[in-house]
Amino acid sequence: MTLAAGTYTVTVTDFWGCTAIRQTTVTSPSGLTASTNTTNAQCSRTDGSLQVSTMGGTSPFTYTLQGGTQNGTGLFTNLGSGSYAVTVQDRDGCSFVTNGAVGNASGQTITGVNTSVAKCTSSTGGLSIQVSGGLSPYTYVVTGQTPNSTGIFTNLSTGMYGLTVTDQSGCVAVSTAQINSVNGMSLNSSIINTSCGLNNGQLDVSVIGGMAPYTYVMSGPGVAPPYIDLGSGTYSVTVTDANGCVRELTNLTVGVSTALNGSLSIVSATCGQSNGSISVVNLNGGIKLYL
């Protein structure tokens, strides 16, 4: 006889007609139900999980994940993103099917990189990395630099850099950034030596590249080129541009022109006529052109 849960009266009669009456209750455990709690997979990896919780039924329980994986704990790990069905069966053979979805937690992306130029071809450039998504904190790596948690890197020279950002879940985002440089300066000079024993030498300096305005510092008189009225000697000129780049010319020597030398060729007048002449020959030294 199969009975449902409830209260029953049982009467027993023997051969002589004697009876015994008893009342009893048939109980039933509450029906078996189950629910799931999931943890997302990270960065499309198979590191998600699903935990089944049971209500009612009679332990122990057996949990079977679609595809045949079975255990007695209800915890299933190393799952990729997707929907999963779990069949729970209790000691009495009662079963219940519950469903759970493992999501995919997308990793972070590098949304921008701000850069500053390297001035004067030196290591004065910098960059900062902006990130969205993923799970903080992040670890930032730039080629040739010490990793940090701020995404800010300084003292960079010109060139291309690889960027790697890793979040707390191990998701990785990569990119590149170019550090440009402000063109440095180059200097040219021209010199005119002194002459006739005077302080009349000249020195001129021209700048190519860099960023105006330029500041000049000379080891002798004068504020800016061309420098005039210089005596013979050795000079230096330092030029600083608007970016703070500095270039220097040293050992600029203003010399002394050789003395003006020559000789006279004389032709006497003849026959009382004005046909004589005086010519300057073998002229050298001084500064050409000659007058």
Image (cartoon, grey):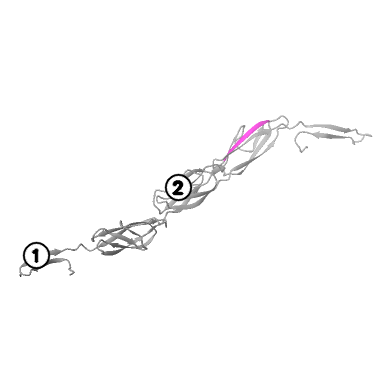
Residue situated in front as seen by the camera: 53 or 7: 7
Q: Secondary structure at mark 1?
A: strand
Instruction: Give the residue at mark 2.
Output: 140
Disc nearer the start of the sequence (2/1): 1
Q: Is most of the magenta stretch helix, strand or loop?
A: strand
Tell me where the magenta segment starts and ends, as one range.
231-240
For the residues bearing labels 2 and 1, Cβ distance under 8 angstroms: no
Q: Amino acid at mark 2?
A: Tyr
**Residue shown at 12% from the left, 64% from the top:** 24
**Residue 25 lies in the magenta-colored region:** no
**Residue shown at 45% from the left, 47% from the top:** 140
Q: Secondary structure at mark 2?
A: strand
> Which quadrant is the N terminus positioned in?
bottom left
Instruction: Give the residue at mark 1.
Output: 22
- Percent across and percent down for residue 225 are 63, 38
- Percent across and percent down for residue 264 are 85, 32
**Residue shown at 64% from the left, 32% from the top:** 235
Q: Amino acid at mark 1?
A: Arg
